[in-house]
Image (cartoon, rainbow, N blue to C red):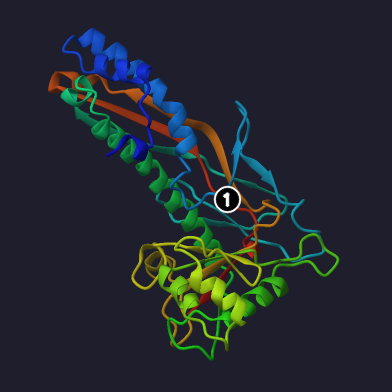
Amino acid sequence: MSAKNQKFQPTPELTDLLVRSGSPNREVALAANAEFAKALELPLRKGLLSGDILEGIFEPIKLAQGATPEFPLDFLAPGTEKDFVAYTVPNHGYIPERHVESDYVMVPVYDIGSSIDYLLKYARDARWDVVGRAMEVLEGSFVKKMNDDGWHTLLAAGTDRNIVVFDSDANSNQFTKRLVSLMKTVMRRNAGGNSASNNRGILTDLYVSPESMEDIRNWGIDQVDEITRREIYTAADGTLNRVFGVNLHDLDELGVGQEYQLFYSNVLNGTLPSGKSEIVVGLDQRKGDSFIMPIREEVQIFEDETLHRQKRAGFYGWSELGFAVLDNRRVLLGAL
């Protein structure tokens, strides 16, 4: 791994700590490992969302010491509108739970943790190619757990609405302009509010499979005008991110047989319209008042003192947080 591609860039100070952490002298190694662990915390905290597909959806809310993770719901919708439903995750890996409450919701916060270790000789020899990769794996483990809990919450909130929008004129697995248009209309009609209301629903973001993103590149002039079609065709991978005023995001976990599709079908018992085989997820992210991530404790990293006798060095850590969708009308599922 070249230095320019390393996420954890070595500094002279960090390299010195790394080398000392590989010392055969136990006291020297453990002291250096303790410093090294604390030095890793800041880049891990900053980088925790770098590979996180939840970035931009859930608002991180740092809880003050002793604060109760209680969030008022009465500010989100006028009292004359229908009661809305909130979803929270009781613990990591659990199925999100439904809440119908009059004015507030308690969002559970829980621990997520991870660990990593490597041979002492890699530290002694300042092998940043190995140690840097180990740190990326440690970070990736946190990210994976956060992604799953956050997306499971979104999918549960959307499934509970019993609304799945689809283009009846399209073939199976065909992502169409009409589906986007239908989802925009259904989001507006079913999110509460009215033309003069701050709570009026608008489809701002659409999460689709990589295959659906490729469908867009194949749209003909019957789907879009020639100028838009040229922009779509010439856009590099990862840069096609907006169509018809809606932000597009492709997720590897969406698509036939993929992880979040299977969670929707097998765990949430979600159904698809006849002839359709995969879901897309639409969100209203205009105001950022519905998707929250309360954080009781940011990620903490510690050295594992038990590994030195095995000629290994290692770190473990945890964070305490939670996920909630406070108003599930901000989530809309589609199918193709």
Q: Is residue 164 visible?
A: no
Residue 261 pos. (x, y %): 40, 68
Residue 63 pos. (x, y %): 61, 33
The answer to which image quadrant residue 84 occupies is bottom right
In the shown orientation, is residue 267 left or right of residue 324? left
Residue 35 pos. (x, y %): 37, 16
Which residue in the structure is indicated by mark 1?
Answer: 56
Helix, strand or loop at disc 1? loop
In the shown orientation, is residue 103 left or right of residue 165? right
Q: Is residue 196 above or below residue 310?
A: below
Q: Residue at x 56, y 71 (%)?
A: 231
How busy is the neighbourhood of tag 1: few (under 14 within 10 Å), some, or many (20 plus)?
A: few
Residue 282 pos. (x, y %): 58, 67
* Quadrant assignment for the N terminus: top left
Query: How many numbered marks, from 0 up?
Result: 1
Q: Is residue 36 visible?
A: yes
Q: Is residue 63 above or below residue 214?
A: above
